[in-house]
Image: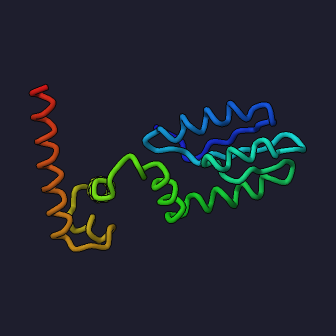
Amino acid sequence: MGCDALLVCAQAQDEPFGRTLLHVARELDHPPALFVVACTPHPDPLEDLAVLGAAPILTEPACWGRLATRLREIWSHTRFYDRAARVLVGRVGLKDAISDLRGAMVREALSRSGGSHRAAARLLEVDRRYIARVAEQLREQEAVDRVQVENA
């Protein structure tokens, strides 16, 4: 299981570590949002981390309220998609990403609905027949994947 956000308290001399942490986090399947709290009165050297994908640098001591606000923003679905796009662009084609998201959402909706296509369709605000079609495509893909694993 991963995490949604990573909070790092850093000083200027920690900037190389922050760069490494960002690069590692961006390679994860579900990269966390990275927050850097500058534990120094001069956070300028840490600003480069924001360019690499960290949230804007927060400075102590008044940062905790801003951190809570930023976390709420990140957990909004739009910000989630922005984070996902940063990781996917250049690594996965748009059609594959959409297909993977569609499959994941249908699997999750079916799981939450106890396998009911009708209830899953309500959760996703689509027609029940669409759920049935995607579920069939998922079963077919799983069968192909199983055969490929057996033949490998």
Left or right: residue 78 versus residue 113 is right
Q: Image point 20% across, 64% down: which residue?
A: 131
Say how the picture is coloured.
rainbow
Above or below 27: residue 124: below
Depth check: 13 or 108 in front? 13
Above-or-below relation of 119 to 55: below
**For the image shown, how many numbered marks are present on the structure?**
0
Query: Residue, x 9% and y 34% (percent of image)?
Result: 147
| x and y, in percent, of residue 65 in the image | 77, 57
Which residue sits at x=55%, y=47%?
A: 4
Residue that lies at the very extreme toward the top in this rendered image: 152
Position of 13 compared to 88: left or right? right
In the rendered image, residue 141, in percent from the top left (x then y), is placed at 15, 47
18 and 72: which one is in front? 18
Question: Which image quadrant for residue 115?
Answer: bottom left
Q: Nearer the viewer, residue 85 or 48?
A: 48
Quadrant of image for the C terminus = top left
Picture quarter containing residue 3?
top right
Residue 59 spot, x, y in % from top left: 82, 49
Residue 125, quarter of the rendered image? bottom left
The spot of residue 18 in percent (x, y) is 67, 36
Q: 6 left or right of 147? A: right
Q: Residue at x 27, y 73 (%)?
A: 126
